[in-house]
Amino acid sequence: MTSLKQLSSILKSVQKPGRYIGGEMHSIVKDKSEVSLRFGLCFPDVYEIGMSNLGSRLLYHTLNSDPGIWCERVYAPAQDMKAQMEKHAIPLTAIESGEDVKEFDILGFSLHYELCYTTVLSMLKLAGIPLLSKDRAEDAPIILGGGPCAYNSEPMADYFDLMNIGEGEELLTDICHLYMQMKKDGSYSRAAFLRRAAAEIEGVYVPSLYEITYKEDGTIAACTPKYPDVPARVKKRIVKDLDKAPYPDKLVMPYIETVHDRITLEIYRGCIRGCRFCQAGMIYRPIREKSPETLCKAAKCLFENTGYEEISLISLSTSDYSRLRELTDLLLEWTDDAHVSLSLPSLRLDSFSEELMQKISSVRTGGLTFAPEAGTQRLRDVINKNVSEEDLLRSVRIAFRGGKSSVKLYFMNGLPTETYEDIEGIAHTAKRVIDANYELPREERPAGLGVTVSVACFVPKPFTAFQWEKQDSFESLIKKQSYLRSCITDRRIKYNYHEAKVSFIEAVLTRGDRRLAPVIAAAVADGAYLDAWDEGFDFDRWMRAFAACGVDPAYYTTRGFGLDEVLPWDVIDCGITKQFLLREREKAYKGETTPACSEHCSGCGASALGGKTRWCK
Amino acid sequence: MVQVKNLPYLTLRFKFYKKGALQYISHLDLVRTMHKIVVRAGFPLWYTEGFNPKPKLIFGAPLSIGCESDCEFLDVRMVERVNEAEAIAALNRNMTADMQVTEAYYTETKFSDMAYLGYIFRFSLLDGTKALPAIVACLEKDRILIEKMGKSGKDKVMKTVDIKPQIRSAEVYAEGEEICIRAILSADPASFLNPEHLVSVLKSECGILREQNLARESYFILRTDAYTKDLSPFR
């Protein structure tokens, strides 16, 4: 353990030393002699990103509510601090105790984005923990992963002892309890613990207990459990009733500014839409809502304990919450007087109304963001985005009339079946938004109109209808990006786009298999760290790593996966059936849409997971 | 929403310390943090008018990262009178041990009346006995020049500035293993001297604190008091 006093000259020389000091209001410090399990909740990004993560807030609260467990936060040091730590042999420590995480029982990493993999390995290195699961000694912490990337964590399979598939509130508690029980009765050994966890706890995937075989053409032949008590497929774990799920009444109050420095209120899980490119819309199914009463109580309590004057109602598509009007009315009963404003990210174009906008702008004003995703109706039907240009124009008219002067539009390049006409459509759509403003009577137009077009690159993701698709090559994506630039002629339209090379690496990792493990280690050895940041990402470094390991990245991207191929993530059962995804894929190519769960059940399979759902048949 | 215009207010001044780990929190982050603390404390706050109503918090002289302080001031505007002792308790419940209020009183004086700030610098050095005369000599010079970013018209340029006139007094002494300086520096906004500037002069001229290290050499700065122009305590 290195004390803050010893670190003083280093803290005075790095950027934002407030990231490393801890001691925040509501951070939880326990007496280590009175707990039986030390848990490190590791977020593979810097403090201000990790502190904003809702999942981490939930799990911190859940685990610490158990008196036998002390859960502490661990973040990735920024580049400058990492250099100092390496130079002076300072190990990775937890925020609360300042103690080496190497001494902990379990380290749980949040795998929220594929490009955080190199940061995970770097954190293990800083902690002095062997990277490979098989090299870890009996007394090393159990290294566990969870979050959206855990649904296909195969590229990281060699590095993790255990993967959490699904929602962590109950799953992680079960894992901790098994660990404590085995430690107590003396039956604990790494192997015995992992085996029992895999066999007894639903939602536990222990990669080392599966054998992967390959065909001659390099595709996967099979993924077979090594023992009969290990499940052939690992079923996702969900929280059945969200109204009864633990929700924090306090938040750790960061001293420094974080990216989402506000109260985040999760209103439901899952999504009724079924956009064919969207992984979150599938893996978080079935849809489970919280009641307005539960939410309002939680919000009031959080406001009193935090002093935050902004409450963000979050979910995958906030305006699809079936009781949104009730909830906002209930909240507005006290929020205005308390000078608290509501923000509703993830609004859909087809359900945006004047009334809703009045509610969210009652205290503070800001811009609005909409996501048409594609530039033509044809392509929007292919991806099942079920919104029309008229929806968009109607929404922006409301926004303009309500005094909003900035509108942000999200699109994607490289979607299956995309043509140059679809790209031109993006420019036309943005132009029509500008025109909509000028069609309003002069006195209703906001001053200083600005439209931002933000274009991401399509990455085919596991557990989506597009999971088999070829990814556009980055040369093609770059060509499309510059074509779109040439189509946007209006100076009032600001154009942003994602780096195609980043999306390429993301695509490799998201559909990757175990043969990518050495590539990630090679990139780390070559200095890869905080790849999710522009200044951390180095495409050439990744290409060097692929070459050094003899791995062709195109196998995972532009090749496309065969419909009958064994997919690296087939070992995971997230509820959504392959038959459903195949059906959706077929409909995509026919340009047919699928209605939302609220209109018609499309039989995705997630209802088999159970849970108190509103729409499932 | 109907906003009642021009509500009268009372200014409650808090004196607090900010020490230990909290020396690494910048002034801007302190402002943000304090904002939430006063909301949590449940005070009858006076809010600014307009589109984005905020409680009105006014801070005394900003404290730079790496400085501790026994002498920070915060003015909070209230729409009704709050008992001072209760106000202290309400704030302290909502702050951590490294930052606590020591005094609260209603006031009408302004922070612009604060002319000087007192500091204690403590240096743990590898060769303190050798450094002491060098530090004394450096501080006794007629001119103490530092390079700092300044403006020339619109451009930012490096400027050489003499900070000697901003040092009201400085006394160097040894205390155990440490070399200390007790200094009174200008707090006037036009000639405010950041105590870190004094440290950087000593670093470059006395050969101390050359590299980051683990507790081999270190320094600590503590702001101790605030004074008016005639060196009487600021309140």
Image (cartoon, coloured by chain):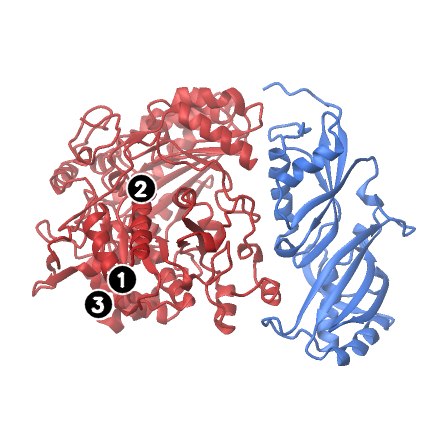
Which residue is under mark 2? Answer: A170
Amino acid carrying label 1: it is: Ser
Label 1 – label 2 distance at C-alpha = 23 Å
Label 1 – label 3 distance at C-alpha = 35 Å
Category of crowding for the residue at label 2, using alpha-carbon neighbours closer than 10 angstroms: few (below 14), some (14–19), many (at least 20): some
The quarter of the rendered structure image containing the C terminus of chain A is: top left
Chain seen in blue: B
Name the quadrant containing residue A53. top left
Amino acid carrying label 3: it is: Val
User: Where's residue A68, x and y in %?
Assistant: 40, 48
The chain identifier of the residue carrying mark 2 reads A
The tint chain A carries is: red
Label 3 – label 2 distance at C-alpha = 38 Å
Q: In the drawing, does residue B24 fall left or right of residue A204?
A: right
Sequence-first tag of 1 and 2: 2
Which residue is under mark 1? Answer: A189
- Disc number at residue A551? 3
Extreme residue in the front direction = A185
What's the residue at 27%, 62% (across, down)? A189
